[in-house]
Amino acid sequence: MSDDSSSPLTTLKILIIGESGVGKSSLMLRFVDDVFDPEQAATIGVDFRVTSMVIDGNRVKLAIWDTAGQERFRTLTPSYYRGAQGVICVYDVTSRSSFEKLNHWMTEVDTYCTNENIIKMMVANKIDMPNRVVSREEGLKFAKRHRTLFIEASAKTKEGVQCTFEELIEKIIQTPDLWDNDRPTFRLGQSTDASGGSLCGC
Amino acid sequence: MAEMEENTVFEINDFTIVTDMEHFGAAFEGILQKYEFSGRRPCLPDDVKYRMTVADTNLISIGNSKLRVELLQPIPISPENSGPATSETNTEEHDDAYVPPFAVAEEVANVKHGFECTDSFLLKFGVRECIVIVPNDSSATFTDENHVNAVMGNIRAILHASRCEVPVFCYIKDQSLDMIAGYASDGNSTYKFSTVALRNINDRHCTMSALLFLFKENLGASTSAFHDEVRMSCRFTHVVPLKQNEYFRNHTVDSFGVLATGPSSSLPFDTLEVAATWRFFRENSLTENYAHSDFDINYSTYWTVKMKSTKTSLLGVFDEILSVYKEETRKAIRTDLNCAAILQKYYTPKDLPNAFQKLTVNSASEVKIGKHGEQPDVEGTNGPMSPALMRAWVDFIFDPSSDTELLSHELNLLNASSLGHQFSEEDLVDNVKLDTLFNYKYPHRSNTFHAPYKCAKKTTVTWRLAIALANARVFMTDQPRAEPQLWIEFLLKLREKYEKMEFVENVNNGIDHMQCGFSQKMQMLQMCVDARLKRHRMFDPNTSNRSDEFFDASETFNAETVMEPNNEGRYKLAGGNLIGNPDMPMYVPVTQDACPLTDEMIDARNEHLFSLNEEERVNLQMELVISDMQSFKAANPGAVFADFLRWHSPKDYDEKTNTISERMLIPNNVWVRSWEAAEPVPVANQARIFNDTKIAEEIFELFNSATLDQVRDWMKPTTFAATLERLIEIESSYEISEEKKNQRVSNAKTLAAATLNNSTKEYNKIAEYCSQMEMIHNMKVHLIHLFQNAKQKMHPPHPSETEIQNAIKQLIDIAEHNVWGCSGETEPVFTVKPQDPIGRALAAMGKLDELTEKQLLNGHRKEYIFIWNFKRPSTTTLPMSHRMYADLRRDKHSLYFSAGNDCNFSNASYL
């Protein structure tokens, strides 16, 4: 679907955050490589993937940063927020505690993000699981209160994954203040492509 | 008429060669035809104000010279109604027998065309609509009067032939000489316009009575009782110096703490220009001759007033502060050198070891402290400013709440030395008043910004340092090396504080990434100090029992510990026993902190991470986990991987089922591998993850080797923010318009963007805005001060606050126009009545009541308009108005005549 020939409109940095084990890496890998591994190893520090997608006829390059959810790595997370245009905050519908920690994550986003208009998205993951404890309404209510986008998804069944990224990128593109400047800082994916995963296959 | 035209055609055909003059004539006639100027022109009503604009421009040549033919037409500026429309309706009201008058004759006769007009031709000749012929280049087209007469003769013929009643003026020689000849006719009567310009006429002729005589003589009239009286207006411009002392800054600890404001060298205004106008008086009602003048400016009809400066630049100190960031900056010293090198003889760095040599010593600090104790002579600069002052200033930068007695003492010395000559008590009081006005202290100072600038916060050391370096440029302009001196002294103190592990910068929960790069480095230094304190405590169990002085400075350090420092690196009990060794309680180990990162370090680290493959990346990021595993093993001998997970990642161990999560059980995964490889090593014996010594030395190395340009660049975002914020503060000393408030908000946003993106264009925009606004502020403050003083000197009734505010506003509008106004716009005018309170206040300001008779006779510029109804050339002709405008300046005396003639000799038969 991606049109490789056209030069990208911009490169966007998307950050995925949330408690340990809610499926952040799985979401990213499903979106970028269209794979799902039920035995996904715990992320160490931060992992990245570079891909691109076409939104409203514009090709945008995406650098997706998948952060570790474990407490011990959190001292480093503030540095990952630098220059991010979008943030995906994931929780696990089968774990109430992961939902209850969302407040903490929202505060962190507000504290550390450098872009005033950063686009936030709440993703309720693992909706394929039978032992769901957080309802859609609860999730929606929280998202409304914090003025974020909201989507329910399952990295395992693919449901909502593509939509998550499309909606987020579309919203970012509609906010030119976020990406339409010549900030001279280092941008992922611009200096090197070596580490990038395959192009979006969806 | 038809026959006449035939003749003309015949005559032109008769020539075999068309002359230059004929070419010109044909072209000029073409222009008149284009304008359709044939017959009567409308007379414009008096109640509408007009502005003259160049409605059309044509280029024609006469020989090799090019001439510009401009059509000047009046455009109504009063909103009530437009001129021509009114005159047309007026015309319709008259009956058929009414013949509209010759517009030029009506205008010349109009006494209201006086000093209220700012348009050149209206003032000089009394006419509005006209055609002006100007040389198009600097080459003098018309070299002499004969040449002009020939051209004017030609023009006259064309005007008559085309029945054009619009006057035509022609400049002789250069336009700047202001020598003008002109002509207008309606076929019956004519007006001849001429100029006399002299470099110097005898003083005897520079009075009203002499000029009146000259005017009459020019018209060939002998004085007779039967003649109408001459109607006159005149305007005397007096330029008086404002008697005031030079302004000097009285430095106080307070004024050193806030960004400097006010004029950069001298006060904005030093002269008062009063143009006193007497309107419409008759011959003999006022006298001015060689010995006597009735024109006492305090009793004129009205004044137009301006405040001026004889200085070339009115810029304030903000311009001086921010101009170092402009490329075309005026540089007093080389700024691309290392600051220590700039100081030359004033500073010799003592035993500066290679910064990295210190790394071989475990704690270089203690050695250094000892040395300082032995050497009483402190390393430092010895000039150009008093080192004691600079050191006291640096102490103030680090801690403004500390004892400022020393700084205050040094400032008194500085004040005494800058006070050139003796000031009287009254002058000093006056200067203090001015100083207070300029250094307005905003009562509701807050620590928040008007927009999220990426710069040092208001209460930080960096913020005060940026202000101090900017102030050094302003307060010590005659010593441009004061700025690098202050920087060097700051660095020495910074090093000393670092060595003594004292407070160097505010840090609140890690490095604040919303602050600028320099501020982040200062925060990093503080974190290095904190890390060293923490390490010392770990090494030396007695440290915690020592006096509290070490821990005062540290905000991030948490002194709360459950256990005394121990060899196993145990921090506290975790609760519960180990799975691997059920008899042993589980301990939470003392762990290492991750290395704090500045923006620069984050960018470098991210770039590095991206250049690695996945395995290398994971290994690099395992650093912290491996350290944790080592500490955990050291604190808990016999512990198994499950124990580590219970502490480190409880999500991966189910306490109910006693199972490890699937993801941690993936065979050969990096967690398990690392756990098995980890040796039990307490933090005290581990390699440092946050190598504070190395990072601090790198920062000191960078600071020490900085050029002045670099230092200024580091201060740039903070200095700009401080300037804009200070501007907002000083502007709040009076009401400002809603429009300006909005401008302020948008400028704060622009600056926030500039600090974030380091965009030069936006910075320049802010610099320009700040220096303009400060200049206006300085003018306001100066005028406020002048009016305050005037009020004390004058007799009641005093002008009200509103009147003063209005006067200040109008005077500033004029000054603004003269500094930034477009040349096309007319200068605003501030008119006052001399006997109104404001007029009397202005008189007190300029001591106008002390003007002597001689000064009255010799104003800087005297202008007179004479209008006389007189029958010319003979007593039987119809009376016509004649006009003379005399403009007498110091170096040039010009007379402009508009002389009418009822007898038209120059008909179309001229050719």
Image: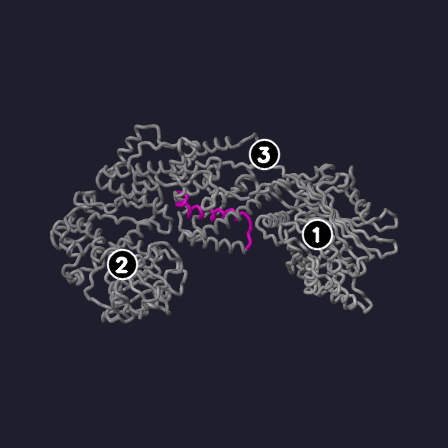
Left or right for B395, reference A18 = right
Residue B216 showing in the rendered view:
yes
At mark 2, the secondary structure is strand
Taking the magenta stretch, the answer to whether it contains residue B93 is no
Question: Magenta part of the protein: which range?
Answer: B711-737
Point out residue B158 in the picture as x, y percentages from the top left corner.
74, 61
Left or right, residue B185 beside residue B331: right
User: What is the C-alpha distance between the residues marked 2 and 1?
Assistant: 76 Å
Amino acid carrying mark 3 in the image? Asp
In terms of secondary structure, what is the magenta stretch mainly? helix
The image's mark for residue B236 is: none
**Badge 2, how many Cα within 10 Å: few under 14, some, many 20+?**
many
In the picture provided, is B290 more to the left or to the right than B178?
Answer: right
Q: Is residue B403 left or right of residue B557?
A: right
| Inter-mark Cα distance, 2 to 3 | 69 Å
Q: Earlier in the sequence, mark 1 or mark 3?
A: 1
Percent of width and height locating residue B22: 70, 59
Viewer-proximal residue among B488 and A24? B488
Indicate which disc residue B116 carries.
1
Q: Quadrant of the C terminus of chain B?
A: bottom right
In this view, B794 is above or below B219: above
Q: Residues within 10 Å of mark 3 (few under 14, many from 20)?
A: some
Chain ID for label 2?
A: A
**Residue at which label 3 appears:** B427
Q: Nearer the viewer, residue B171 or B157?
A: B157
Disc 3 element: helix
Residue B656 x %, y %:
17, 62
Circles 2 and 3 on the same subunit: no
The residue that disc 2 covers is: A67
